[in-house]
Image (tube, coloured by chain):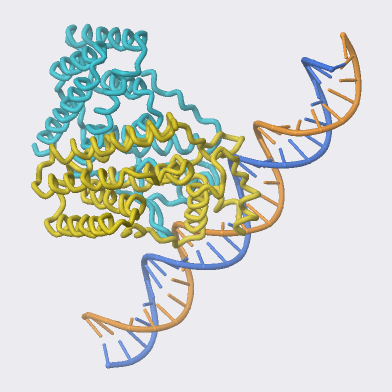
Chain colours: A cyan, B yellow, C orange, D blue
DNA sequence: TACTGCTACTTTGTCGACAATTTTGCGCGA
DNA sequence: TCGCGCAAAATTGTCGACAAAGTAGCAGTA
């Protein structure tokens, strides 16, 4: 994952990253209360940095806060997941459209080679793929859109929430080979600079993921 | 404008709203530095509440911050405005789609009567419309989507930035009557529960606005 | 027993002071 | 005159303490 360009510099940064990790991965339970004093002793920092970290978590939609009452980790609901995928469909569709217009030939070539490496892994039977590989694929297209707002909303906000759902509701499941084909066609459209088609395919791709996840939630 | 459900409760809230207003309306110049000590004396609060306010402004994409250096108000560029409208096209298109599915009949009736009141004003020659009326129209559809993330991203983030561009680059211009027709057709599609068409019309509507603004920027 | 109101406690909000980092400006030497 | 380095000033980051709001528990009364 060529992901983590963000590296902590201040103490509040470190605390924020740590807290985000703990929340996303379930070390801090969904729906639980975040006590400032408690966290400040646990992480050995002052309440001021805890407060700043919590503020940023709120901006990421990972916690909700009430004035004079406190902050709680968001609760995960099927409806929430559906809503999240609706936003993803919209934004990542646009990202694919823009990527088809704005990615450099070199970036597209890289994307294709990434896809090839995935293909080998899938073919050799490794059911690896879904987590890291899928994230990496989508991440490159998002960044390839070259749209600052789009990139920020998706990578700073939506994606950590999606991962939280994936981890805590145990969404690692199949959809490997079919998803791979979908990825292939998206890259093909981007390579042809067909923005319209790239958007449509990406939206379908995410729509399918949503259906797959929805049916898994009900079982 | 049925907008301001958000009312300040804490001191940091008030400072945040005030600062946001000052930035959006240009009382604090785009690109200028936000000195914590300076602001704390100016608004007569401690640096802690200023810091919290700045953090929230950063989350709204109205200021950018560098560790150990400070925060600056974002600078307005033609490219930035284009990018903003790309995100709007994507998200508000989805909002219209979801509104067609999720708005109650009562909400739709309200939307239609809002449109009628606009029609009267436009017909009676008042070039009123564009600012408050336009915002109100879009706001209702966004809320009508019933998608929490969508609503938050648009009303807490994007919209203040759009308004900042409008105010500071003097975008109040025409496009009144044509925009009204577009609004009418969108409402018609929502009323027919035609989600597909509602999304398409909304995307076109925003696309046209973008072109109109772009040409105005170049003149 | 159930409800109301008070009190004590816990938690969040705000403040001023200190620490750490960055920026500024001066002096020195080439 | 220009560039380098060091020191001083200014700015941001962090901390502990106090203020204010909310919560829980107890006592008293109907």
Is A53 or A25 nearer to us in this picture? A53
Quadrant of the rendered image containing residue B150: top left
Above or below for B174 versus D18: above
Above or below for B92 versus C23: below
Image quadrant holding the C terminus of chain A, namely top left
Looking at the image, can residue A117 be seen?
Answer: yes
Above or below for A178 versus D10: above
Q: Classify residue B214 as left or right of residue B191.
A: right
Above or below for C14 versus B25: below
Q: How many marks?
A: 0
Horizontal and vertical percent position of residue C29: 90, 14
Horizontal and vertical percent position of residue A126: 20, 12
Residue under the image location 48 percent in, 52 percent down: B21
Image quadrant holding the N terminus of chain A, namely top left
Q: Classify residue A113 as left or right of residue B80.
A: left
Residue under the image location 22 percent in, 20 percent down: A198
Is A121 or A206 nearer to us in this picture? A206
């Amino acid at each position: 994952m060529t992901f983590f360009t963000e590296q902590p510099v201040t103490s509040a940064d470190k605390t924020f990253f740590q807290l985000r990790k703990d929340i996303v991965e379930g070390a801090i339970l969904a729906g639980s209360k975040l006590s400032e004093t408690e966290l400040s002793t646990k992480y050995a920092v002052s309440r001021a940095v805890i407060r700043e970290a919590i503020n940023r978590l709120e901006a990421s939609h990972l916690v909700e806060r009430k004035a004079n009452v406190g902050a709680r980790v968001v609760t995960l609901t099927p409806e929430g997941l559906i809503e999240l995928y609706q936003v993803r469909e919209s934004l990542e569709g646009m990202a694919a459209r823009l990527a088809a217009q704005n990615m450099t030939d070199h970036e597209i070539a890289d994307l294709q080679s990434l896809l090839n490496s995935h293909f080998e892994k899938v073919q050799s039977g490794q059911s690896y793929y879904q987590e890291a590989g899928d994230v990496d694929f989508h991440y490159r297209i998002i960044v390839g859109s070259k749209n600052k707002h789009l990139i920020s909303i998706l990578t700073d906000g939506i994606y950590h929430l999606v991962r939280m759902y994936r981890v805590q509701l145990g969404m690692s499941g199949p959809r490997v080979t079919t998803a791979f084909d979908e990825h292939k066609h998206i890259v093909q459209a981007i390579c042809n600079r067909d923005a319209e088609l790239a958007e449509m395919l990406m939206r379908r791709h995410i729509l399918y993921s949503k259906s797959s996840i929805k049916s898994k939630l009900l079982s």
